[in-house]
Structure formats: structure tokens, C-alpha cells
Image (cartoon, rainbow, N blue to C red):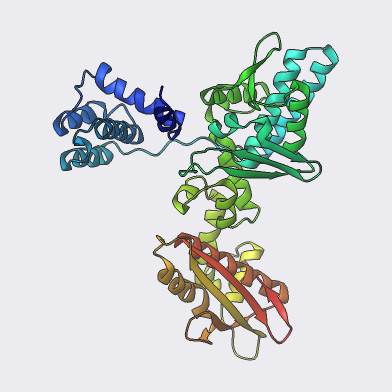
Amino acid sequence: MTRVAQYIEAAERDNTRRSYASAIRHFEIEWKGLLPSTADAISRYLADHAATLAINTLRQRLAALSRWHTDQGFPDPTKSPLVRQVLKGIRSVHSAPEKRARPLELAVLQQIDQWLDAAISNAQRSGDQPALLRHARNRSLMLLGFWRGFRSDELVNLRVENTEVTPGQGMACFLGRSKGDRQLQGRVFRCPALSRLCPVTAFNVWVDLAGLTEGPVFRKIDRWGHVADESLHANSLIPLLRSLFAEAGVESPEEYSSHSMRRGFAGWARASGWDIKELMEYVGWKDVKSAMRYLDASDSSLQARFEQGLTALAPATLQPAPPLLLTEQADALRLPAAGTTPVAVLRVTMVLTRFSKQSRGLALGHRLIEQTCFERFAMQRLNAKGTRYELAIPYLSRDVLDEVIATLLDDMYRIAEDNQCLLETSFHEPATDSHWD
């Protein structure tokens, strides 16, 4: 292979190259298609597999066929109107919800970690070196995969010499290439040391136990306890994790995959108060659409949003008494007779910015926040830009006022995210010099 060919091969991810080769093989050998092909033949190929292959798989097959024709200097038949119309029809007739891995929740992660801790202790007492190595490797792989939100290929591409540990602080992992790094510039992924379920401690234990000084971090281990020179294969992580989860007594282990760690961390971070920009930067998502595929709104939070609105709108005399918190919020949101309830006069600062140049919801997000959050509280604009407002919020107690403002902030951030915007806001009550943000 010439040096030019080596660089051309290095410019493409191994997974992409393998998947494209598999797609061409399926079209040419299994379906008996001819290359170069025509729009009519590719349309028939799509139709023959529409009922058995997922729409994303069909798109991947088209991408591979498109790439083959372009590389060989032939016109690309996949871009024809006929092929696009057939694919659109398949999407309409065979629509189905996207299958996603079950997110690994923190409680389940703790359950698996506790099982691994006990298994490591048992292996040490019995002198079972192969089991000790496997359990230590799996513990490091799982904790680092979760807390760093790594994909399977990122885990298997980690190298010892590119990982730096600072005791008591954390670790930094350099990856020369990853799925989100289209320009192949490389990136450093940092992970903090934690008081519990610590990925840094687990990493140190595994590397020291295996005696690793360079090469892949996560490697194959044979039945005699020999640690291989090569890394685990990305496709082996799903059966490895499912087997581990089953041994740890996790319910329905077949519902999990290597993506479960990434989805689980994303859900944990959002529930812990991370905003979407922080999460995207930490995990490595480049656009909001990719990030939102990993974030699921819980049924309980969805129900609470609906019930909050219903309680605020319904007359209290016609409805049975709701739970205490919603009653307090409903009372606070209804404007009482003048002079019977104190009113907090608040100054609000609000700045909305786009996630990216492609975001188009800035004006709509601004308008919705005014209409749904501010107007019911006698909103007054204090400047032409719409960044400073004055609100008058009646309240029964300071605790209720805090709840109302917290609800407003939640709604404002939700509207901003729904419209692909970043929100910076704060509430100030000059009379008491109180602040909320």
C-alpha cells in the first residue's frame, strides 16, 4: 500500500469502512444487483427490503451505494427523484418507533458496581486471577463509559499512554479520532475523581493489576488470565455488558447496550441540573438534535407540567382539592382582590441567544416566554431590546413566591431549549434585594 493510500484509508473510520463494505456486499452478492447501478434497480432494492430492514438501515445502504458510485467516477443514482420518492413512501408505510437502548440509571449502575466489588473480593480471596482481571476491567470500563458518556468505539480506542491521571482530581483521556470529530483534530476528554462510583480509582486498579504501561486500555482476557495486546472489539461490548448485567441480577439485561451508559449519563446530568449547552460540550454533541435523541422526559415530569396548567386555569370551587404544592401555586397564580395579598415587584433580566447559526427559533422563543410566562403578571418592558422587564407577582407567603419563580424559570428554560436557544436570566426584587436565577 502506498503512503497516499494509507493516508486515504486513515481519513475514514474503520466502522464506516466496514459498514459500507457490508452494504455493497449485500446489494451485489445477496440481492444480485449489478454495479454500476441505475435508479430503477436501487428503487427495486429498497422496495424488496422495505418490510424487513429499518429505515435507518436503508439510508445507510443508500449512503454506501452513493459513495461507491462517486469513488468509481459514475453518476450517483441514489440522488434521483425516483429513489427519494420510494424512500419517502417506505417511511410512510412502514413507520415505526426508533428502537433505543434502555438508559442505565444510577441506581442500576450502583447495583452492578456493588456486585463487581463483591466479585473482586471473592476472586482475591480464592486466588482466581482470570476472574480478578475480568471484573477489574469490566468495572473500569463501565464506570468510565458512564461518567464520560463514551461511545463503544471511543472506549476501545483509549490508550494508556494517552491517559493522564491526577490523583484526587481526575483524569484526562486523549482520543485522536471519534465519531463527532469530523476534522480528525483529536480531543481531550476530562473526567473528575468522585467520592463514590469513581471511574479514576477503577481505572488505576485495572491498569496496575494488568501491568499496562502503553497500548489499548480495555483488552481481551483469555480463560487463563492472559491479557491480550489488542483491544476489545467495539461489537463485543454489547454481549459483554449484557452478560455482566445478568450476573449482577439486573432485570431485563437484553434491553441494554453500550449506548445505555451514554443515555444514562445524559439523563442523570439533566436531572441534576446541567443545562443542554454544558451537556453537549461535555459529551461531544455538535447539534441539539443529536443531544435530544438521548434525553427522555419522564412520565412523571410530563404529567406534572399538564397538571400544573390545569390547576392554574380551573376555578377552585369546581375542582376537588389538589395536592398541597399545586394548590399553593394555583393560589399564587390567581390575581387576588387589591389590598388583600402582598405583591412582589420584580425586575427580570433575560438574554436569549441561538445554539448555533442554524437555529431559527430565537424570535419565537422570545415571544412565547413573554406570552406564557410574563404577561399574566402585569408585564412591563423596560427597554426596547426586550432584555429587561418588570413583573408584579402576588403571593401568600415567601415560600410560595419562591415556588412560583422556580416554576417560571423552569418554563423559560424549557421554551428556550425547545426553540434551540440558550437562556441567561435572573429575577431581582429591589424592595428586599432578593435574587433568583
Q: Which part of the image, by quadrant, shows the C terminus? A: bottom right
Q: Quadrant of residue 51?
A: top left
Q: Residue furthest front?
A: 3
- Can residue 114 be seen here? The reply is yes
Left or right of residue 435: residue 322: left
Which of 199 and 436 lies nearest the eye of the viewer?
199
Left or right of residue 265: residue 57: left
Q: Quadrant of residue 90?
A: top left
Left or right of residue 127: residue 32: left
Q: Residue furthest right?
A: 125
The residue under the point 31% across, 39% down is: 95
The residue under the point 43% across, 74% down is: 367
Which of 57 and 182 lies nearest the eye of the viewer?
182
Q: Position of residue 392 (x, y in %)?
A: 59, 84
Q: Position of residue 375 (x, y in %)?
A: 49, 80
The residue under the point 22% across, 26% down is: 48
Q: Quadrant of residue 388?
A: bottom right
Q: Residue furthest bottom?
A: 339
Indicate whether 183 appears above or below 346.
above
Q: Which part of the image, by quadrant, shows the N terminus? A: top left
